[in-house]
Amino acid sequence: MIRTILFFLLGIVSLVAQASTPIFSDTTTLKPKAVYGKEARVISYILDNNHYRKLKLNDSLSSAILDSYISELDNNKTYFLESDIKSFDKFRFEIDDLTRNEDVSPAYTIYEVFQKRYNDRMDYVKNQLIPKTFDFTIDEYYETDRENAVWSKNAAELDELWRKIIKSQALSLKLAGKNQEEIEAALHKRYDRFIKNIEQFNGEDVFSVYMNSITEAYDPHTNYFSTKASDLFKQSMSLSLEGIGARLVLDNDYTKIFEVLPGGPAEKSGKLHVNDLIIGVGQEADGEIVDVVGWRLDDVVKLIKGPKGTTVRLQFLPAETGVNGPAQELILVRDKIKLEDQAAKKSVINYQKGDKAMKLGVISLPSFYMDFDAYQKGDPNYRSTTRDVKKLIQELQKEGVDGIVMDLRNNGGGSLAEAIDLTGLFIKEGPVVQVKNSLDKIEVGMDDDKNVLYTGPLVVMTNRFSASASEIFAGAIQDYNRGVIAGESTYGKGTVQTVLDLKRFINEKEDVGELKLTFQKFYRVTGSSTQNKGVTPDIILPSALDSKQYGESSNLSALPWDVINSTPFKKASDINSKVLAGLNQSYQERAKFDQNLKQYISETEDLKRSLAETKISLNEAKRKKEMEEAERKKAMNKDMAAKVSNNDGLAEDELIKLKDEYLREGLLILSDLVTNRIG
C-alpha cells in the first residue's frame, strides 16, 4: 500500500490504496526529475544537522529506509515475490550515500518492479478470479494481518492469497444481498477504480513516498510534503472546511474514522464513531452509493466533502461489529466546522449522592486554540482556550457547582502557550512544562500569574487520542497534585515540529516541497517526558484500544521516553496517595455492582475483541452466524441500556440520562472527590 502523510500531525493518509494497479500491455516507466535529487540531498543535510534525534544518515538507517519503502509500496505482502525482495538488497546499505549524491534511483527501480507485479495481480484478478463462482461451504479463513507473513515464493502462492482476498470480498457482497451477476459487476467496478488509481500515480508521487521513508526513519512526525501534499495538509488544518467533520485514515482496504470533530455533522448525528469503516459514499438522499473499498483516501475525501447544506450518504461498518458485521447507512448534511464548534463548552449535571445534592460542572475542550489573527489585529475580544475556559469557570462558580470535570478526550493539542496559561487557572504559579531542543538547551514554560481562578475539586478526563498540549496540561495538573486524571493513557506525542520551505535552500524554477521537522521535545516539571508513554491516569477506565496499534508507541521510529532533571515547583495538597486509593477502591466497587459500568466494561471488551480479530471466515454459514451474533449483542446492549438504573435508585438523577458512560464515570469519580473533601 502506497502511503504518505497528508493530514494533521497524528494522521496517515494514503495516496494509493492496497490492490490498485491497471492491466497494462505497455507499462510506462516513471523517472525522477533532476530537482528530486537536489531535494533529497538538502533534506538529508537538514536531518543530519537539525533533527532532534541527532541521527546521521548511515548504513543502519539506510537498511531501515529500504524496509520502510518496500512496506509503503506493499505493506500487506500481496504483490512482491521473495526473489524481488532479495534483489532489492543491493540498495540496503547504499541509500545513505546515494541520497547525499543526489541519486534517488532506488525509488524508481523498486517501483518499476512493484508496478509490474501489480499489473500481474490485476490481470489475474480481473480475468481469473472475478468471473469465478466460489464455494462458500468450504471451511477456510483469510488472515488480514500479514505483518509477520513471509513473502510469497512464486506466482502460485500469490494466486492462492488473492483467491482468498477476492473470495472474502465476494462473500461480503453476497451477504449484502447481491446475486452472482451483481457481485461480478461490483468487483469489476472496484478493480477498474484500482486500475485508474495507479494510472494516476506519477514520478512525484514515487519520490514523495520514498522521501517519507527517509524522513520517517528519524521519527514518525518528520515528513516530506510534495507541493500537492502541502496544499492538502494546510487545507486539513483549516477550521473552515466544509464536510462531515471527521478525520480519516486508510486501514488496508478500508477508510477508517480516526477522529470525529466536535460540532460537526458526524458528531451531532451520534452514529459515526472512531474506528468505524466507511465502505460506500452517495450524493444526496437518493444518489447511488459508490463502493469505496480500496480507494485512495484523498479520492474518498473528495466524495465526502462538499458545499454546506448538501447531503451525503455514508455506508459503513460499525467498529463494534467490524468487517464481520452488517453495514449501516447514515445521511448527513454537510456543514462548516467553525471555531465556535471547536471552542470550550460547559454543562451542569445534578446528582444526588446519599443526602447530598450536588451540582457537577463539565467543561469540554476539543483543542487548545487561539485566534492569532484577531490577537495580532488588537481585537480585545479575541478567542482563546484560556479566555473561554476562564469565563466558563466563572459561570459555573456562579451556578454553585461542587466540582468540575475538564474533558480532554480526543483533544489532539494545539497552542503550547494556551496549555501553559490554562494550567495557570488552577495553580498559584510555577513551571508547567520543560522544552528541550536539538542543542540540548532547556527552556521552562512558566505560569507567572499568582492568582488561582479555581481551587475546588477537579477531575481531568483523557483518552488515547488526547495528545500534545493536552498531555502537558494533564501532566502538570497531576504533578502539582491539583486534580485527578481519569480515563485512558494519553497518546504520547511529546515532540514539536516546524515546517521548512525547501525553496530557502534550493534555487530552482521548478516547484519543490516542504519538510516538517521534529526539533524539540516536551518534558513534565518532574523531568519525565510525555513522549511515547503519555500520561498515565490516576484512575484507569476500560479501554478497547491497544497501545501497540493506537498511539505514539505504535510507531517503530518514535522517539523514546526519557527523563531530564526536574525543575523546582511547589505541589498543592489537594490530592495524595490516600485520596487516590479511596477513589480507586470506590471505582472497583462500582465495577462489581453498577449496572451501567458493568455494561460499559462488557461492551468495551467486545469492541477490543472485534478490533483484535484479524481472521475472516470464508464460510457463508459461519460468517452469517458471526453477523447475527454481532447484531444480537448490539441489540442486547441497547436493551440493557434502556433498563439499567442508577444504584441510588433516583429516577430524577441526571446521571441516568447520560448516554456517555465514560463521562458518567468521570462525574462519579468527581462526586467521590467532593465527598472526600467534605468528609
Image: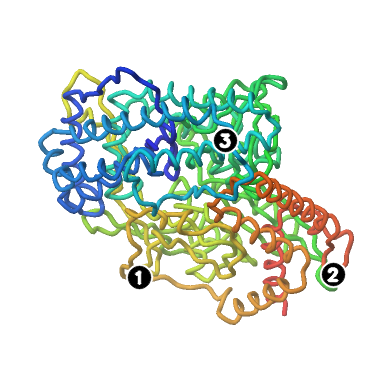
Q: Amino acid at mark 2?
A: Asp
The crowding category of the residue bearing disc 2, from other C-alpha atoms within 10 Å (few below 14, some 14 to 19, many at least 20), is few
If you read the primary sequence from the N terminus, does the residue marked by circle 1 or circle 3 appear first? Answer: 3
Q: Amino acid at mark 3?
A: Leu
Residue at point 76%, 54% (across, down): 658
Residue at point 57%, 35% (across, down): 339
Residue under pointer 2: 648
In terms of depth relative to the viewer, which is nearer, 512 or 420? 512
Residue 544 versus residue 262 in the image, above or below: below
If you read the primary sequence from the N terminus, does the residue marked by circle 2 or circle 1 appear first? Answer: 1
On the image, the x and y values in percent for residue 390 come to 59, 51
Residue at point 72%, 68% (across, down): 671
- Indicate the secondary structure of the residue bearing disc 3: helix
Q: Could you say which quadrant of the image residue 437 lies in?
A: bottom left
The crowding category of the residue bearing disc 1, from other C-alpha atoms within 10 Å (few below 14, some 14 to 19, many at least 20), is few
Q: Is residue 649 left or right of residue 531?
A: right
Foreground mark, 3 or 2, reads 2
In terms of depth relative to the viewer, which is nearer, 456 or 187? 187
Residue under pointer 3: 339
Locate the N terminus and report the quarter of the image it occupies: top left
Foreground mark, 2 or 1, reads 2
Q: Which mark is residue 566?
A: 1
In terms of depth relative to the viewer, which is nearer, 147 or 617? 617
Q: Amino acid at mark 1?
A: Ser
On the image, the x and y values in percent for residue 308 come to 63, 22
Q: Could you say which quadrant of the image residue 492 lies in?
A: bottom left
